[in-house]
Image (cartoon, rainbow, N blue to C red):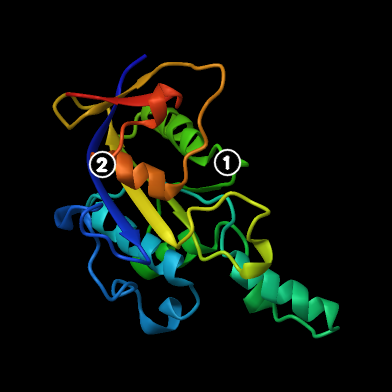
Amino acid sequence: MERLRISDWRAWCAHDDHDMIPSRREILLPIGSTLPRLLKRRLDAAGRATCDILHALVPHDGCPLIHASRHGDVAHTLSMLESLAQDIPLSPARFSMSVHNAVLGVYSIAHDHRQPLQALGACGHEFDALLTEAEGYLDAGHDNVVIVFSEGELPDTYHGYTPHPGQACAVGLRLSRRVGDGPHLAATHPETPAEPTPLEVIRWLSGSTPWLDGLQRFTQVAP
């Protein structure tokens, strides 16, 4: 198998920790500065950060974009469910922003992106799914693929019922096959893959933690 190489990456967390994220990899605040105001207001903080990360990583000639989130904008979804329980009608525009591909849709409108877009949810295996899909695009002949993994704030109603990093966060990588483009990701094919959150991926990329004891199917290796 040809190697996936990390040519660049960016990260954001709602509760900033400069010891965890090197400043050269951290997106600038205020988040959402790369979006027109009318589009920015449609997204939560994680969605805005995702668009900023994409803006920083997508090359000038464009490339496929893949966004994954286990929960998406769950606060938005919960609010709509509560409205339905009270027989309050929902607007189509509000519903359209609750679907998993809403963030990529906003980004594509704001930046006139015309290459493939893909949104994923994988029951905890989002990072593994992102890398697998990126391999497919690179095998199909694309020079680069940008992947972003994010989570929004989790409403109190869900606490204790689903794994979550504990804060809104997002991390993006630009991947390629080019030799010399950075550290590569080598397949290890474990029987039980890990289920990292975006925060765990950020800590791994920043070098503050080893990669989950090698359980993940892809392990970072030196160039």
Label number found at residue 124: 1
Closer to us: 130 or 109: 130
* Residues at marks 1 and 2, CA–CA distance in whole angstroms: 22 Å
Residue 82: give x, y in percent of width and height: 76, 77
Closer to us: 199 or 144: 199
In this rendering, the answer to whether 194 lies above or below 42 is above
Closer to us: 124 or 115: 124
Which residue is the site of mark 2?
Answer: 208
In this rendering, the answer to whether 145 lies above or below 46 is above
Q: Residues within 10 Å of mark 1 (few under 14, many from 20)?
A: some
Q: Secondary structure at mark 2?
A: loop
The amino acid at mark 2 is: Ser
Residue 214: give x, y in percent of width and height: 40, 23
Q: Which callout, 1 or 2, points at the residue further toward the start of the chain? A: 1
Nearer to us: label 1 or label 2? 2
In this rendering, the answer to whether 185 lies above or below 74 is above
Q: Secondary structure at mark 1?
A: loop
Closer to us: 169 or 166: 166
Q: Residue at x 21, y 29 (%)?
A: 183
Left or right side of 192 for 86: right
Left or right side of 29 for 117: right
Q: Residues within 10 Å of mark 2 (few under 14, many from 20)?
A: few
Q: Residue at x 48, y 72 (%)?
A: 44
In this rendering, the answer to whether 210 lies above or below 116 is above
Where the C terminus falls, by quadrant? top left
- Total numbered labels placed on residues in the image: 2
Q: Residue at x 70, y 81 (%)?
A: 91
Left or right side of 117 for 54: left
